[in-house]
Image (spheres, rainbow, N blue to C red):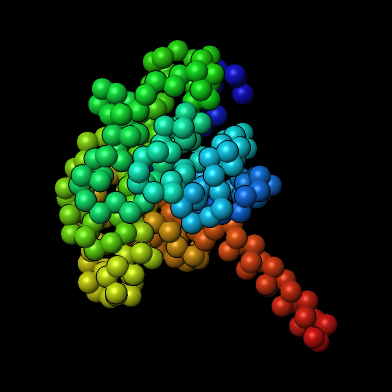
Amino acid sequence: MSALNLPTPGFARSLREATRTLVGTWVKIPALATVEILALAGFDFVVIDLEHAPLDLPSAYTATVVAQAHGMSVLVRVSDRSGSQLQRLLDSGVDGILVPRVSTPAQAADAAAGMTFAPDGDRGNGSTSRAGRWGAIDRDRYLARGADVLRAVQLEDRAALDEVDAILDTPHLNGVFLGMGDLQLSSGLPESDPAIQALVDTLLDRAAQRQLPVGTAVRTAQQVEAAAARGFAYVMADNDAGILRAAATDLVSDIHRRLGA
């Protein structure tokens, strides 16, 4: 890889060029070996979870470097919607960001602005950071890649989906993510409820009209297949801790069965 080439394209570009749903998983374990194993397993991307895992900016930075060195894209779910982490993560060269708990058009606008270069947004020039290859690429290339990062908000409560059109029309927003777990909590309804499914259908339909990719998270390969068929452009399958737990549990159960334990 040339020192002047960025390790991976921005994730928005990857989604535009993809011929299938892109499949990733969450990173929750603070270990670089885990990230490398996930890359070698063949995931298209990982999402480093700063909201629900004991991870911080330095660990997200090093995980990004390892993942991209293996050609795997990196998204980061920031810890909250305050915007305090956006600039440093983007300067680290991540391929996209998910901003959680976005419920209103105003919150979506703030999130998108924080990930968009001035004068259209609030992102500053960090061309001498890793995102700019430490100043080794010119300003135009730096800005072009910045335009191709995924700038997505998580819609995870009923209020957000009730305002879906206004949120999807947010300037410079180029992706959304459906948080089904919190949607169930906020609505008090199970995922199977027709009202919930109607909200999901509306989100997918309105996003498709705007050519905005929608992501979600599931547990199994069968659920990934169903999500892809439904129109989700990127899907997270389980997480590193869950994958390890399941594999370890299956192995120990098989050993006990064979030993008659």
Seen in the picture, residue 199 relative to 119 is either above or below; the reply is below
- Count every numbered label the image shows and give the total: 0
- Name the residue located 64 percent from the left edge and 66 percent from the top edge: 245
Residue at point 27% right, 70% down?
A: 187
Q: Return the x and y of residue 143 as percentages of the image width and height.
A: 38, 21
Q: Farthest residue toward the right?
A: 259
* Quadrant in the picture for the C terminus: bottom right
Say which of 99 and 176 sits in front.
99
x, y percent for residue 22: 45, 48
Q: Residue furthest bottom?
A: 260
Q: Name the side, left or right, on which 123 lies relative to 133.
A: left
Residue drawn at point x = 52 percent, y = 61 percent: 238
229 left or right of 38 in image: left
Which image quadrant is residue 246 in? bottom right
Image-based side of 198 in relation to 43, left or right: left
Point out residue 250 in the picture as x, y percentages from the top left corner. Answer: 68, 73
